[in-house]
Each structure stands twice: as C-alpha cells, then as structure tokens.
Image (cartoon, rainbow, N blue to C red):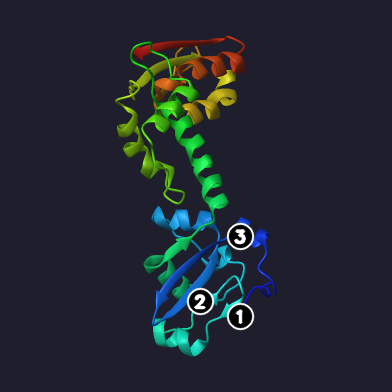
Amino acid sequence: MGKKDYPKEHTESILDEYVIARLSSHGENFEILIKPDAVEKIRGSKEVDLLENMPVDKVFSDSKKGEEVSNEMLNEVFGTVDIEKIASDILDRGDVQITTEQRRKRQDQKRKEIINRIMRNSMNPQTGTPHPPQRIENAMKEAKVHIDPFKPVSLQMEEIVDEIRSLIPLNFKKLSLSVKLRGDLYGKVYGELKNLGSIQNEDWLSDGRWNGIIKIPAGVKEEFFEKLNQLTKGEVEIEVIED
C-alpha cells in the first residue's frame, strides 16, 4: 500500500520535510505525515493530491514510532480504509502538529513575503515612495503581528495591513502609465510589462510603435522605469497618465 517503507527510527530529516496531522477519536490518535505546503494549499481552498505529498500512504497511532492503525480501527472510525479519504478527513477535522523550528522557518519565510508585497504594492503618501523593508518589519513587530505558518499570505495581507496602518502611512493606489516603444522592442519587454503590472489596453501607432496602457502598483514605479529603460537602452517613452 505504501510508496516506501517507513524508517525504523523517526529521524529529524523526516520532521524537516513533513508535519504531523492528527485527529483524536474513539480514544485513539490517527496521524499522517504530509508536506506543510500541501496543508497551506488546502487551507487556501486549492485542490491537492494528498498521496503525492505524503512519504508513506499510512495512518499511524504514533508516527514518531511508526506504529500503524489497524484496518479494523480505520473502518470503525472513518468507514473506509482509503488512505486519501482518511487523510482528507484528518486534515479537515484534526490539528497540524509543527515543531518550533518548522514554525520559525515558515513564519520567517511568510514575513519576508508579506513585507515584500507591502513594499511593492503600496507607497508612503507623504513622500510618494515605497516604505523601506526594515520600516515595515519594525511596524509589524511593534504591532505584534501574528503570522500564521499555514495560512496563505494573500489571506493574511488585509488583516496585517490594518494592524500596521496606525504606525506607518500606507497608500495602495495604483498608477496608470502610457508606454510607447519601437515595434522591434515589443517582444523583448512584453513579458516584463506583464510581470510588473497589468496591460489595460494596447495598440499599434501609425509610425510602427507599440503603445500600451499599463496599471502598476505604486510601489514598483521606480523599478518599472528602471527595468524598461534597461531593456530598451533608454528607447522607451513612459508617461504617468493617472497619479
């Protein structure tokens, strides 16, 4: 049934890569090992192939000792011995166990991503420039922001921004830019345009140049100008049409 044999001794390397999801029922513990990224995707309402994210297709009473639950007990509690259905039930009704080191690593990773998103998508309305990363991080520390190690960053952003607004001014305004460049440069910069913002409208001018209206987060304005000038060697015309 399993993809590979469970190691005779539970090693730290297993805990580095997987977390324990546990459901307690009928006086018994039911545990599975699963990658933490899969837990996050599930909590973000994404479909996940559970078995692909488990080192073994087994349910344990004690995963650290490798003690498995009998099929009789699985049938009694879950009404099936289908590991994927049981794993889904455990994740839905149970708790995810995480080591201190795993929690620290995931929270640090998410903190950096949150800081980067705030910096790129907002600006200080007093200066018209993005807040430096350290200022955002300091505000998060002062506000004692809690970062959920399994909740997708996109679902944590609004609450975190609300928590730090009283400490640093934030404006999430977007800018609309008109970009004009030679036709032969179009293919070279198109991917970067889509990466930095969203193309609202585009057409070809009578002189053969491409003209696009791009909406970008205010925080990436300087990066946008720098990237396009670098890619075109300065042969680009950029105009802010909504500021």
Return the x and y of residue 98 as percentages of the image width and height.
51, 57
Q: Secondary structure at mark 1?
A: loop
Q: Quadrant of residue 163?
A: top left
Q: Quadrant of the N terminus?
A: bottom right
Q: Amino acid at mark 1?
A: Met
Query: Disc number at residue 1?
Result: 1
Q: Nearer the viewer, residue 239 or 28?
A: 28
- Whether label 3 touches label 1, CB < 8 Å: no
Q: Residue at x 68, y 75 (%)?
A: 5
Q: Nearer the viewer, residue 5 or 228?
A: 5
Q: Is residue 213 above or below residue 164?
A: above
Q: Quadrant of residue 215?
A: top left
The residue to which callout 2 is attached is 83
> Dot 3: few (<14), some (14–19), or many (≥20) neighbours within 10 Å?
some
Q: Residue at x 61, y 75 (%)?
A: 66
Instruction: Give the label, 3 or 1, closer to the camera.
Output: 3
Return the x and y of residue 136 as percentages of the image width and height.
43, 26
Q: Residue at x 37, y 68 (%)?
A: 93
- Whether label 3 touches label 2, CB < 8 Å: no
Q: Amino acid at mark 3?
A: Leu
Query: Disc number at residue 15?
Result: 3
